[in-house]
Image: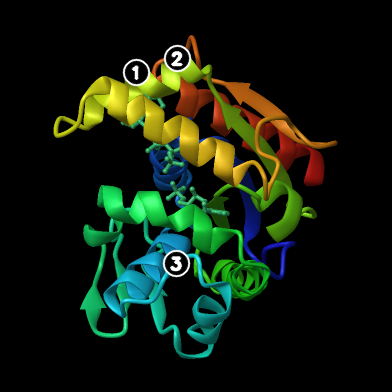
Amino acid sequence: MSKHSYPLFVAIDGPAGSGKSSVSRAVARRLGYGYLDTGAAYRALAWLVIDQEVDPENSAAVSAMLPTFDYTIGTEPDAYFVRVGESDVTDAIREPQISAAVSAIARVPAVRTHLTELFRNIARAVPQPGVVVEGRDITTVVAPEAEVRILLTATEEARMARRSAEISTQSAHTVAEQLRSRDRADSQVVEFMSAADGVTTVDSTHLDFDQTIDAVVEVINTARNSHD
Ligand SMILES: Nc1ncnc2c1ncn2[C@@H]1O[C@H](COP(=O)(O)OP(=O)(O)OP(=O)(O)O)[C@@H](O)[C@H]1O
Ligand SMILES: Nc1ccn([C@@H]2O[C@H](COP(=O)(O)O)[C@@H](O)[C@H]2O)c(=O)n1
């Protein structure tokens, strides 16, 4: 029987475009763990706010939506989906208008408290022996007691180049400006640019995708061995 009553918790923080989602999902797949993308919940709430024609800057109106926010996310690395009620919003939450609105919603304290509790419950319930949870504040706020805590980072230049390579509908300049402005807004609320005490930094600036996965898996295996 496992020594853990809950799945082993791997917490991964980092700035926009550092590879949190793609690397975390690949790591979870390799280790047979669950995968939880926390940014998707902030995005899904932003989607609902816009869909209901609520002003994202109206924190009281946004907070009032929380009790009926019916959110579901897939935690299998190969069966990812995001739903609000009956609506599948997996693709819709990646639209630029959602990225532009999400930071305003994420700075509302009631939203952060509500979603933090939701993330803890979802992570505890995965059927796998471990779960990789990624977002801006996972190592510091959501799971400061996690068995494994990693700050995944890369230089702003590398992150912008990677992000603009995957977005063909906007100029590299626009993509870079959006990434910078989201990091600026988010960093007023949570610290994700430097590692808190006990958090291991993985800097992927000079690593390719597979090397980054290897580096993260090595940190997990080292921590796992020290817990056994
Ligand atoms: N080490 C790497 N080398 C090359 N490309 C990478 C590396 N790590 C991630 N990428 C690529 O960088 C892009 C951004 O990664 P990803 O979307 O996972 O970042 P993120 O941190 O989740 O961003 P955000 O917080 O904005 O959602 C993706 O296209 C991903 O495949
Ligand atoms: N733990 C988190 C995760 C996300 N946010 C906010 O959501 C936005 C979208 O996140 P992505 O990872 O999908 O890009 C992000 O810009 C933050 O505003 C958060 O606050 N905490």
Name which of mark 1 and mark 3 comes first in the sequence.
Answer: 3
Furthest toward the right, the residue is: 197
User: Which residue corresponds to mark 2?
Assistant: 157
Q: Residues within 10 Å of mark 3 (few under 14, many from 20)?
A: many
Discs 1/3, front: 3
Q: Could you say which disc has been placed on residue 161 in the image?
A: 1
The Cα–Cα distance between marks 1 and 3, rounded to whole angstroms, is: 29 Å
Furthest toward the left, the residue is: 169
Q: Residue at x 55, y 33 (%)?
A: 217
Discs 3/2, front: 3
Query: Dot 2: what SS?
Result: helix
Q: Residue at x 67, y 50 (%)?
A: 189
Q: Could you say which disc has been placed on residue 147 in the image?
A: none
Q: Which of the 4 image quadrants contains residue 183?
A: top right
Q: Is mark 3 within 8 Å of ligand 2?
A: no
Q: Determine whether label 2 and label 1 are within 8 Å by CB.
A: yes
Name which residue type carries label 2: Glu
Name which of mark 3 and mark 2 comes first in the sequence.
Answer: 3
Query: Dot 3: what SS?
Result: loop
User: Which residue corresponds to mark 3?
Assistant: 56
Rendered location of residue 108, percent (x, y): 61, 66
